[in-house]
Image (spheres, helix red, strand yellow):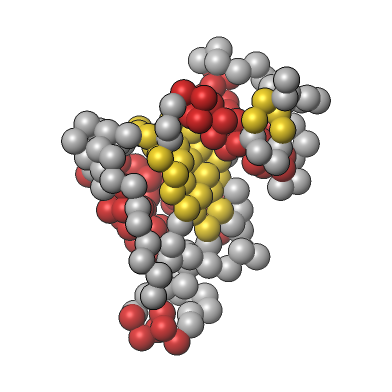
Amino acid sequence: MTNYRRSDVAGASYFFTVNLADRSQSLLTDNIALLRSAFEYARERYPFSIDAVAILPEHLHTIWTLPEGDSDFALRWRLIKTVFSRNLPHGEHRSDSRQGRGERGIWQRRYWEHLIRDEADFSRHVDYIHINPVKHGLVSRVADWPHSSFHRYVRAGVLPVDWAGDEGVNWECSERKD
């Protein structure tokens, strides 16, 4: 079995990609209020800030900053996934191994995590998060996707409402064009 190594830097910012087990589903956007409550439930018990987020039908991207002295993002993800899953009706496909462990078949077991290295890395990942609904063909303009922190960035005056309208972001690597 592969020996997965996760970052363990207390008080750091992390980028995450979390997927549903069945990528043809749209459970996240269909149950957006439930997902928000799962996030709030976890944040009330184990605080963290959500610096950027985009919820797509079958996956999500987010950047979190954990409190000083705390690096346990795995606990927070476990709580979010559990609270969300417990409140959905049963009926999803479950593999033999999931059935044997008494697990639901809602989420992929693992997720992608990346320790944010510096301000430039943070900015590239925020751009990637915000452009993602356009990249996946869900909307033609970033501002048209409702389940994104992009709107918070616009209200704060950080980004214009027409950000990435025609140019300015390389969708493949999420870096700004020169």
Determine the image quadrant of residue 98.
bottom left
In the rendering, at what x and y percent does residue 27 appear? 55, 59
62 left or right of 162 in image: left
**Residue shown at 53%/79% (left/top)?**
93
- In this view of the protein, which residue sits in the foreground, 154 or 18? 18
Q: Is residue 160 above or below residue 2?
A: above
110 left or right of 101 in image: right
In the rendering, at what x and y percent does residue 68 appear? 22, 31
**Residue shown at 28%/40% (left/top)?**
9
Q: Which quadrant of the rendered structure holds the N terminus?
A: bottom left
Q: Is residue 177 visible?
A: yes
Determine the image quadrant of residue 126.
top right
Q: Is residue 6 above or below residue 69?
A: below
**Residue shown at 44%/27% (left/top)?**
118
- In this view of the protein, which residue sits in the foreground, 96 or 34? 96
Q: Which residue appears farthest toward the left when viewing the image?
A: 69
Q: Which residue appears farthest toward the right when viewing the image?
A: 166
